Image (cartoon, rainbow, N blue to C red):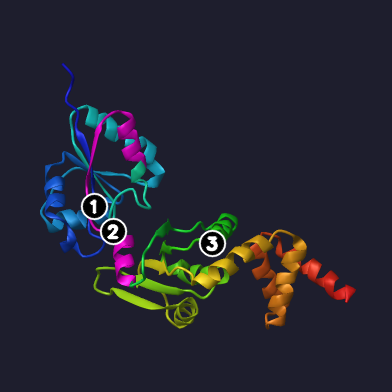
Amino acid sequence: MSSIHGTLYVTGTPIGNLGDISARGLETLAKADFIAAEDTRVSLKLLSRYGIKKPLISCRKHNIRETAAKIAERLQGGESCALITDAGMPCVSDPGADVVRVCRDADLDVEVVPGPSALVAALALSGFECRRFSFEGFLSVNPRPRRERLLQLQNYDGLLILYEAPHKLRKTLSDLHKTLGNRKIAVCRELTKIHEEVLCGTLEEMIARYEETQPRGEFVLVLDAPPQQLQSQSQSQSQLQSTLQEAVKIAVILIQSGKKPAEACKIAAWETGFAKSEIYRGLTNNTSDD
């Protein structure tokens, strides 16, 4: 006779307003033997609001492998676990997917209890027509993969949805503008919370706004698809940037448009992958030849 294993319940929680928890979500949290939470301090606020007292274990990125193995072991022993994140659905921009994978590899039951999602909420609030979209989560903070990913997205003809922290918002808006052009964007802040705010405009308008206003709270960015005529331009631009000579040409054009040489070389370096010093040397040699 086979032993009875427990179940992992992937449970959605509110993204801000604690009243958004579903009846099934509350029932699941109440019946689980223990809860695996991204940050137990954050989760305690939700559990305390509804009078739920359950053992909590931390399920953070730095301890995810060890924690996933322990969760699977407890499920094999017959316990049930509710997997939750700080806000929204687990496994979206958090380490929960590792827990699900370990449990599936061990032939354990995994069920989902759907709940709020910040990316879907922002998409609905943007008002943009949605034929398709790409969820990019948080862009890499490493300059090279960040640049490469944005260049890859130049040719994408759907909406782009990103998460961003307040201290990185200005740079991300600037990088999006430099790579993808002056598209329409919905900047969604603190969704479902007291200070919820949704601003719609162009990237240039949002850059100007946050030069004057300090970004606060957590952001979801919804970037509109490029106009059809810009898609072909974007494709040709992405094919241009392959040689140092072309990188120097980009810097020259930027200088002619009013940029200082150092700033022009910096932008050209970001867009092409060549070192700023290489482009500056090429620019100097080009000037000397003239």
In the rendered image, the vertical position of residue 237 relative to residue 26, given as above or below? below
Disc 1 residue type (three-letter): Gly
Alpha carbon distance from label 3 to label 1: 33 Å
x then y, percent, for residue 209: 44, 81
Kindly identify which residue carries mark 1: 12
Kindly identify which residue carries mark 2: 117
x then y, percent, for residue 193: 25, 69
Is 104 inside the magenta-drawn segment? Answer: yes
Kindly identify which residue carries mark 3: 155
Q: Residue furthest right?
A: 289
Alpha carbon distance from label 1 to label 2: 8 Å
Q: Quadrant of residue 263?
A: bottom right
Disc 3 residue type (three-letter): Asn
The residue segment tinted magenta is 98-126
- Between 31 and 126, the one lying in front of the other is 126
Q: Nearer the viewer, mark 3 or mark 1?
A: 3
Callout 1 secondary element: loop
Kindly identify the residue that appears in the image at 32 percent across and 44 percent down: 59
